[in-house]
Amino acid sequence: MDVVDLSRLQFAITALYHFLFVPLTLGLSIILAIMESVFVMTGRTIWRDMVKFWGVLFGINFAMGVATGITMEFQFGTNWAYYAHYVGDVFGAPLAIEGLMAFFLEATFVGLFFFGWKRLSRLQHLMTTWLLAIATNFSALWILIANGWMQNPVGARFNLDTMRMEVTDFGAVIFNPVAQAKFVHTVSAGYVTGAIFVLAISAFYLLNNRHRDIALRSMTVAASFGLASALSVVVLGDESGYTAGENQKMKIAAIEAAWETQPAPASFTAFGLPDQKNHVTRYAVEIPWVLGLIATRSFDGKVLGINELAAQAELRVRSGMLAYDAMQRLRENRDDSALHAQFQDHVKDLGYALLLKRYTPLVTDATPAQIHAAAEDTVPPVAPLFWTFRVMAGLGFYFIALFAWAFYLSTRRKFETARLFQRVALWSLPLPWLAAELGWYVAETGRQPWTIDGVLPTFLSASSTSAANVWVSLAVFTVFYSVLAVVDVMLMLRAVRAGPDGLASMPLSRPSGAQPAAAGGTDAA
Amino acid sequence: MPLDYETLRIVWWAVLGILLIGVAVMDGFDLGAAILLPIVGRTNTERRIVINTVGPVWEGNQVWLILGGGAIFAAWPPLYAVAFSGFYLAMLLLLAALILRPVGFKFRSKLENKTWRAVWDGALFVGGLVPALVFGVAFGNALQGVPFHFDDTLRAYYSGDLWGLFNPFALLCGLVSVAMIAMHGAAWLACKTEGAMQSRSRRAGVAAAAALIVLFALGGFAASSLSFYAVQPPIDFAGPSNPLLKSVTRGPGLLMANYGLMPWTIAAPALGFIGAALAGFLAWRGRRAGLAFLASGLSIAGVIATAGLSMFPFLLPSSEDARSSLTVWDASSSPLTLLIMTVATAIFLPIVLGYTAWVYHMLRGPVTAESIGNEKHSY
């Protein structure tokens, strides 16, 4: 494997790993804030005990997220140096603002969350917890603004003098519709993860007849929070399908294995075996109209097929070659206005010409066969996208059903006796992580062959470091992260087994939960 | 545009310096505490005390580093690209140490097993020492120039290797950094501990401050004989960020040139020495631990500013192709990005400093065996 493949593998491994911790932080921080609000409003100390117990698990997870997050930031420089040069002017700012506005807040208050129970008043501590929760969500916002720009690079243009993309409209970068849809979809997925985590561990306690007071109350919070979030993931997941229809037609065509443009409204392929080589889907089971409705929100909007999009890409490669040609000749003669005009006319397709660098370093001497091959390269791997998307979407609907069931049980106060539900909830524990990782895979594999859609191909983005270096780092990360994963899971399991006992003075409470508020007297405010 | 491009570049050069000083001062004291873990903490309880002095704050401190990285990415993209990819294995070393450290804080005391704790103590020591050393070594290499060049698409090629980074002068800079960080960690521990641990911290502080003064002087002496770089006039202060548009000469003594051109810059090395001397003196007399911590922080600011001012306007000179060198005038982001970042920093940095101060205020007071015994969330 070369530097590009190795760097991609390393980025994928470290990002997927980091993304094991992020969704739980997003969801659990809000759940903690909700629980603590109940404590402050009612004065019932059991709610504070719940915050402390789930807080221990939150803390283990948070430390892993911080430790693995630095790797993500650094890799843009270490492994993707040409990317850093080419788009740092646009992409760097949201990352830096994330640090300034969100991560600082989050990381500064997380210590106070744990160590502040005896030092802060109840309201001060509640404020700390809410700031922590809000900051984690702001963090996600800025990261997804950066990521959204990779998917839909708005508000920037190529500068010939500096050979890079530069910001022209920062507002467009922030309010990028792809970024906004991704933000809502991703944080909702995080909330679902947090809710299922709480639901599953509470179910574990109920199955073992332990800590029932805390487990029942936690389940009630998780059920309603989870139902709202699960609905939001799917409804707003559809929203990101919609914007992909506007901005990333190729991605949605690949996800749907839509080779040909169909007459509107397009049908949805529920099952099939996409064959990338021959551009057909075998054994396809199609549901009429559905895709057209989802992707265009209309009966007459067309969903473009892969073949038509690849043909358009071929035109853009040819147009980009003119920009590239002008760019090369402007080096010799900087003041040639005809060349400047030619460059400006075609610069929007410059990225497509860069796809030719794989076949001919000179670009402008590409043969028709090479141009055709470069256009074909704009088709991402169809079968993996088709299937991962379907599994992810299936899980999304499963979560709605699970939380609907949980919500029903919670309104009937039947959690304690519903043994089947408890088992199902427990065994559902890994599923939100699976869905989140698949979602990441769909979003980023669907972006290929680009790091910045239509602007910079992935194979040009890597550093000019040696493959040996990347092998070393890949080995170090793999060993390191495997050990950390074992330790992390071990500590989590210990904390779950130990349970909430001994974390705080916990007066025995009655089944109805009707404790006298005076029990809050043990609170060291 | 309310600020012109030249001014924005100077502002971001200064902000880069402030952020690097922020990393060294804020993250520095918990790195230093980790380095001193085996010296100040003799027993298990004492080591837990050392760890718990930084337990509630290391996450926030680490953000200075993350923000420093983000700010270089946003404001100096070519520097980010060249330095991070060029120093590939050194960065890996740094990352490994930085991952080990938080995890060590968090996991060390979760099991009551002697071997488990000894392994994590070792990991914490290494996790403190390696970043301090690597930061210094990186500066040492920047002061000598680094072997890289750009092609005409501004793709950077780096021709050095890991061992080349650890040359004698760079190692000297690495030691300056370790002494500085250890001094700062000692000053922190003297503020946050009592009794025997506090006396040990003070002794460590005196030793580290003395070492810093000697090593920093040696470093200055060695730097005066290094050959360095100068940009050939005319310089376009508001020109496009393309390093290949200038020409650069190389010669001896140029690292000292700025002190002749701008005599006020002598204040930076002076601050480095005076701050260290004051921190060492106060530690020796066992008085005013808070003031000693402040003096140590000012010394750090002086040392880092010395390196930055000596190189100005260079950020990272190239020893292989002097023209490819990165300077303040040709390695920044566009004016619009710098302006946006300036506004964001002007709004949020004071807020960050405000709530950080509040959090430290709420967590004030020494950490003792009793206080960590009472606290369920102690590390």
Image (cartoon, helix red, strand yellow):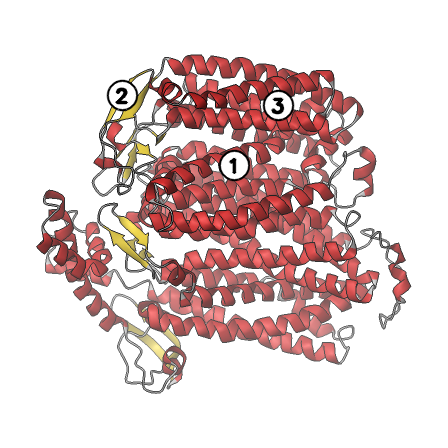
Check disc 2 and give the amino acid type.
Answer: Arg
The residue under label 3 is B183
Give the alpha-carbon distance from disc 1 to disc 3, as whole Å: 24 Å
Q: Residue visible at 59% across and 35% down?
A: B26
Along the line of sight, which residue is nearer the eye, A226 or A401? A226
Q: Is residue A73 left or right of residue A424?
A: left
Check disc 1 and give the amino acid type.
Answer: Ala
Element type at mark 1: helix
Q: Position of residue B56 (x, y in %)?
A: 68, 42
Give the mark nearer the N terminus: 1 vs 2. Answer: 1
The residue under label 2 is B250
Note whether B282 is above or below A240 in the view shown: above
Q: Nearer the viewer, mark 1 or mark 2?
A: 2
Q: Position of residue A471 (x, y in %)?
A: 40, 39
Check disc 3 and give the amino acid type.
Answer: Met
Question: Which disc number belongs to residue A204?
Answer: none
Along the line of sight, which residue is nearer the eye, A378 or A478? A378
